[in-house]
Image (spheres, rainbow, N blue to C red):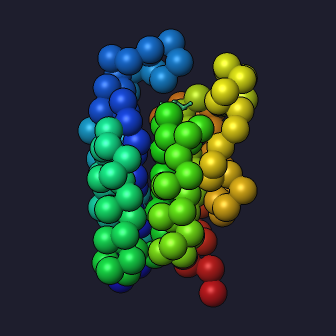
Amino acid sequence: MPHILLLQGPNLNLLGQRETSIYGDIDLNSINNAAKAQVEQADMQFSSLQSNSESELIQRIHQAKVDKVSLIVFNPAAFTHTSVALRDALLAVAIPFIEVHLSNPHTRENFRRHSYFSDKALAVIAGCGADSYRYAIDAAIKYIQKP
Ligand code: DQA
């Protein structure tokens, strides 16, 4: 059965409380539940992890290879702009991934304009709030179902 992993980076555990004018009112649980329902509706396996630790995210990406994950939907959060190590982990396991952001980082501070992931991602979806995840999961399902 195809398997989609939703991976979430630092501070996203605070969604719904954190800078709500930028990230909205929806909490992480609601995003995960909606993503899970969407994936299971397509008869695929869903798993998810949010971590504030770069190391834990790297370990989960390594484990994804063992688990035969088909595709990773990833919001690296602040690690988007800093983490060569997470980029290398994704390249090491060679699992296709879609980069997701709630906000559009290009409209914000200059340091958010650079991503260590975008040039390797299947797609980048940003600026649609919680709907960014819905569009990303939809794209992931379509990519997996493509003959
Ligand atoms: C974010 C954008 C990042 O720049 C920021 O550090 C985040 C969240 C987003 O989803 O809009 O933590 O990835």
Residue 145, x across and y down, in percent: 55, 78
Residue 107 found in image quarter: top right
Query: Does the image show residue 93?
Result: yes
Look at 59% across and 38% down and name the residue there.
81
Q: Is residue 96 left or right of residue 12?
A: right
Residue positioned 31% across, 26% down in the render = 14
Q: Which residue is at a point 46% across and 21% down the rendered structure image?
A: 24
Side of 71 where 39 appears, left or right: left
The relative height of residue 37 versus residue 67 in the rendered view (above or below) is above
| Closer to the camera in the image, 120 or 21 | 120
Residue 62: x and y in percent read 37, 70
Using the image as rendered, state which of residue 77 and residue 25 is in the foreground: 77
70 vs 10: above or below: below
Give the farthest residue toward the front. 85
Residue 82 on image: x %, y %: 55, 40
Image quarter hosting the N terminus? bottom left
Compared with 15, 126 (above or below) is: below
Residue 75: % across, % down: 49, 45
Q: Nearer the viewer, residue 34 or 117?
A: 117
- Name the residue at 49% across, 55% down: 85
Q: Quadrant of the C terminus?
A: bottom right
Q: Is residue 129 depicted above or below 67 in this figure? A: above
